[in-house]
Amino acid sequence: MSDVATLDSKPGAGCGAPEVLRERGQREVFCGLTGIIWLHRKIQDAFFLIVGSRTCAHLMQSAAGVMIFAEPRFGTAIIEERDLAGMADANDELDKVVTRLLARRPDIKMLFLVGSCPSEVIKLDLSRAAQRLSKRFLPDVRVLNYTGSGIETTFTQGEDMCLASLVPELPAASEGDAPNLLIVGALADVVEDQFVRTFGKLGIEEVSALPPRRSTELPAVGPHTRFLLAQPFLGETARLLESRGAQRLAAPFPLGVEGTTGWLKAAADAWDVKAETFEAVVAPGQQRARVAIERYRERLAGQSLFFFPDSQLEIPIARFLSRELDMQLVEVGTPYLHRQHMAEELALLPTGVQLSEGQHVDRQIDRCRAARPDLTVCGLGLANPFEQEGLTTKWSIELVFTPIQGFEQAGDLAELFARPLVRRTKLEV
Amino acid sequence: MQLTVWTYEGPPHVGAMRVATAMKDVHYVLHAPQGDTYADLLFTMIERRDKRPPVTYTTFQARDLGSDTAELFKTAAAEAVERFQPKALLVGASCTAELIQDDPGGLAKALNLSVPVVPLELPSYSKKENWGAAETFYQTVRTLAGPNAPAPGSERTPRPVGRAPSCNLLGPTALGFRHRDDVLEVRKLLESIGVEVRVVAPLNATPADIARLGEADFNVVLYPEIALSAASWLKRTFRQPHTTVVPIGIGATKDFLKEVGELTGVDPNPALAGEPSRLPWWSRSIDSTYLTGKRVFVFGDGTHAVAAARVAQEELGFEVVGIGTYSREMAREVRAVAERYGVEALITDDYLEVEERIEALQPELVLGTQMERHMAKRLGIGCAVISAPVHVQDYPARYAPQMGWEGANVLFDTWVHPLVMGLEEHLLGMFREDFEFHDEAGGSHLAHGTRRATAAAEPVPEPAAAEIRIAAPVLQAAESRAEAESAPAAGEPAWTAEAEKELKKIPFFVRGKARRNTERFAAEHGVAAITVETLYDAKAHFGK
Ligand code: SF4
Ligand code: SF4
C-alpha cells in the first residue's frame, strides 16, 4: 500500500480525454475465481476445479449466495499441510481428485483446473497437469487450465482467463470458409439468442458464441472470423483471437440504446449491410428500449453517481446512465482500464469526468463521503455500511448476474439503478 | 488434497475476523490477496452489520511477490493505526501470505507502534474457522490481560462478604449463531440469582475490558469451541473457575444454574420458581402427543449438536436416530451422546457423507445447519437450523435466543414448526386420495413445497439477491437429478405396479421410510418382486 497515486496525462490519452486517477492500495474486489459462478452455469458440460485453499472454497460459497444448486459443477481441491510438507506429491493428489471426480460425474466433457494464489505461490504447474490429465481422459474429457487467482486477476478477469484458455482449442476455420461472426463473452442465454436473431435479420448467418453452451460446440476461428466483445473485460482473449487471425470489430459495448446500436452496427458494417436494412432491423428494438428507459428518466435524471471499481463494466454503464438518463457522474472507478477496447466508450463520456483505475479503498471512501452522491455503486462489503451513513447504494455484483445487454434489457438496466432510489423515498422508517 | 464443494467452516483467519469484528477499538491487519476481501460481506450482508469489519487487507499482487510484500505489510499496518486509531492491533496472514512467510508479527513489532500488538499464527492448511476464533481470542486475552496477572502461585483474594458474585461471559462473536440474544438471555438468568455480569467478550468488548477480565469471580463459557482455551488460561493464571454446562434446553439450564450455585455459593432455586419457561407444559400438553418418537437427525457444531440431542430426546420426546458434528475438537463429547442414545456418531466435515447418512436414516426431522437445511429440502424432510454455518434468515429481527428459559421456548416453536401436525397427520394418512392432500401440498401451515424436485430446483439467491443470469439449465439439472434418483438400481427388488400404487397412499413424510424398509425387508427375505403383501409384511416386521 504505497502512496502511489498519479494523475495520468500520458500522450495518447489526448486532450479532452478524461483524467484518470491511478490508485494503489487496498483493493476491495473479488478475485477471478468468482467468474466460475456464472461460467459453470453457462457451459453446461464443464466442471471447474479450483486448486486452492479453504479460503477459495469459502469465497465461492459466500459469493455464490451459499449453496444455490444441488450439486454445482465446481469444487475446490483444497491443498493441505501434507501437500505442502512434501509428504504427498501434489500432482499425484490432484490426479486422484480428478479421477474420482470424473468417475462421479460422467456428464462432464470439459474440466478446467483453475489456479489460485496458493497454487501459484507454491508453483504448482497446472498447465502440465492439464496436459497430463488430458492425455489420460481424452476423448471423453478435455482438461484445460487457467488462473483465477487474486494475485493475477480481478473479478471478471477470471472469465477473460477462462475464455483465453479456450482459444487454442478452437478448431481452425478453413481458407474457403465464409466469414463468421463470433460473440465473445458470457451472456445470459436469452440475450445471446436475441442477438443471434438480430444478426440473422441483418443477413449475418454464421454467428457463434464464445463460450459456447456446450464444450463440444467450440466455434471455429480463422482469418475470416470477425469478433465482437460482448463484455469489456476480455483483453487477453481478444489478443489470442487476434493472434489466430480473427479481427476485433471496434465498438462500444451493447448497453443501452446507443451502445447496442453501435455494437450491432460494427458487425453490420463489416458485413456491408445496407444502411436502410440496418435501420429497419434495429428501429423496433431501439424504440422499445427508449420507451422502457423513459419510464425511469424522471427518477434518475440529474442524480449524481459514484462507481467503486468492480467488474470493468463501470465505464460503459456510466456512459449509458449519463447519456441516456442524464445522470451526473462524480467518479467512475474501474479495476483496470483497457484503453484500446474502451476507446469508443471513452469518446462518449462527458468531458471532465473523473475516472479512477485501481483502488485505495479508504481514500476512495473518503472521496465518496465528501461528495455525498445520490447513488453509490459498490460491492457487498461496503453497501450496508454506506446505507447506514445515509448514502443510497446499488450492489455492483447484480450488474454481472443480471441480463442487462441489448435493446430488450436496456429498461431493466435503468431499473436496477432506479430501484434503490425508489425504495429510499418509499420507506417511512 | 481434499475435494470440497461446500464447507462447514471457513479458514482460520475468518475466525480471527469474527473476534476482531465483535470487539470495539481493535483493528486487524491481514496480509492477504484482494480476493480474500470477500470475507467482509459475511458480516455486512449475512449478519447485516452496518459497519465495515475493522480489517485492512494488504492485497498484494503477483508483481509484489519476492520484492516488497513485507514493506507493503508494514505500510498497511502503520496506515491502519494512524487512520483507525485502534487501542490494540491484531496482525496475521491468510493462506497465501502464510506461504510467503513475511512474519506479520515480527514486522509489526519492528514498527514500534503506540498500541499493543497481538500477533496471530493461524495455520491455514490444517486448521479452520472456529479454531482460528478460539486462538485469536486466547492470544488477545493473553496479550491484554496478561500484564494484570497475579504473581504465579499467589492465592486469589476471596470475594469480600456482602459483595455479589460476578462473572464474565466468554465466547460470543460476530457472525455467531444467535450469540447476540444468548448473551441477553444468560445475563438475565444470572441476574435472576444475583450474579453480576462484568465483561462480555469478545462481543462488544474493548481492549480495556479484556484487560480487566481477571477481576470477576468466575467465567461463563458460552461457546466452548471459541472460549474454552481462553477460559482455561484465565483459570491457570487468575485462578478463575469457569462453567462447563451450556444452558441450552430446560435440563441444561437447570444444570447450569446448579453449577453456578456451586461456584459461587448462591442459591439457584429462586430462578426455578414459577414456570420460567413454557417448554415443559407445551411438551406435556396432549397436543404434543404426536411428537412422540419422531425420528430426528442432529448435526452441527459440537456444542449445539450435544445440546439439541438432549432437548430432542428428553424434552420433546423425539427419538434421536443419528447425531454428528463437523467440530473434530468436540468429537469426544458427541460420541458420548451418541452412545447414550445408542446411535452411531458421525464426525465429518464432508457434507456428502452427511447427506448420505440422512438419506439412509430417513428421519422425520433434521436439526442441523444451513447445509442440512438444503439437504433436507431436497429430500423433502422438515428441518430446523440449530447451529452455524448460518445464513441471512438465521439472523432474525426478533429476539430469538437458544439459551436459557426463553431459548427453550424458541426451540420448541422452531423445531415443531417443520413437522406435519397432530390431527392433520392422521387425516393425511386416512384420506390419501383427497386431491387437496396431494404430496406437493405439505403441511397446511408451511408455505414452501416439500416435493423433492421443486425443492432441489429452488434458487436461494441471497445474499446476492439477483437472478442468476442463466436460470433454465439449473432447473433441468435439478429435475434430471431427481429423476435419476428415483430410478431403481439393477439387482434390487423391483416394485410391482400395484405395490407402487399402495405406497403412494402412504403419506409423503413417511413414504421414504416405508420404501426403504420394504426394500430392505425384501432384500433380506429374498423377495424379488415387491407386492402389496410385501409392503404390509415389512410394515409388520419393522413396526410403524
Ligand atoms: S484471492 Fe487467492 S486465496 Fe483468496 S480466494 Fe481468491 S484465489 Fe483463493
Ligand atoms: S394449519 Fe393445520 S397444521 Fe398448522 S396449526 Fe393449523 S391445523 Fe395445525
Image (cartoon, rainbow, N blue to C red):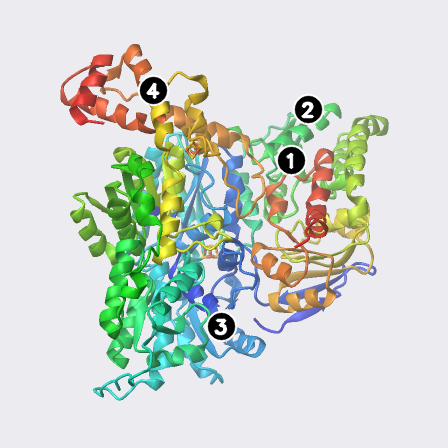
Query: Is residue B385 positioned above or below B185 on the image?
Result: above
User: What numbered label is drawn on residue B47?
Assistant: none
Of badges 3 and 2, nearer the viewer stands 3
Chain under disc 1: A
User: What numbered label is drawn on residue B24?
Assistant: 3
The residue singled out by tag 4 in the image is: B430
**Percent from the top left, x then y, of residue B382?**
37, 37
Q: Is residue A70 left or right of residue B223?
A: right
Q: Work out whether disc 1 and disc 3 sit on a shared chain.
A: no
Specify the amino acid type for callout 1.
Answer: Ile
Task: Assign a secondary structure to mark 4.
Answer: helix
Chain under disc 2: A
Query: Is residue A261 positioned above or below B258 on the image?
Result: above
Q: Is residue A179 left or right of residue B211?
A: right
Q: Work out whether disc 4 and disc 2 sit on a shared chain.
A: no
Q: Work out whether disc 1 and disc 2 sit on a shared chain.
A: yes
The residue singled out by tag 1 in the image is: A183
**Residue lying at 61% horizontally and 45% vertically, measured from the top left:** A400
Q: Work out whether disc 3 and disc 2 sit on a shared chain.
A: no
Task: Assign a secondary structure to mark 1.
Answer: strand
Specify the amino acid type for callout 4.
Answer: Met
**Residue lying at 70% horizontally and 54% vertically, measured from the top left:** A339
Specify the amino acid type for callout 3.
Answer: Lys
Within-10-Å neighbours for mark 3: few <14, some 14–19, many 20+: many
Of badges 1 and 4, nearer the viewer stands 4
Q: Disc 1 and disc 2: Cα gap in Å?
A: 13 Å
Within-10-Å neighbours for mark 4: few <14, some 14–19, many 20+: few
The residue singled out by tag 2 in the image is: A205
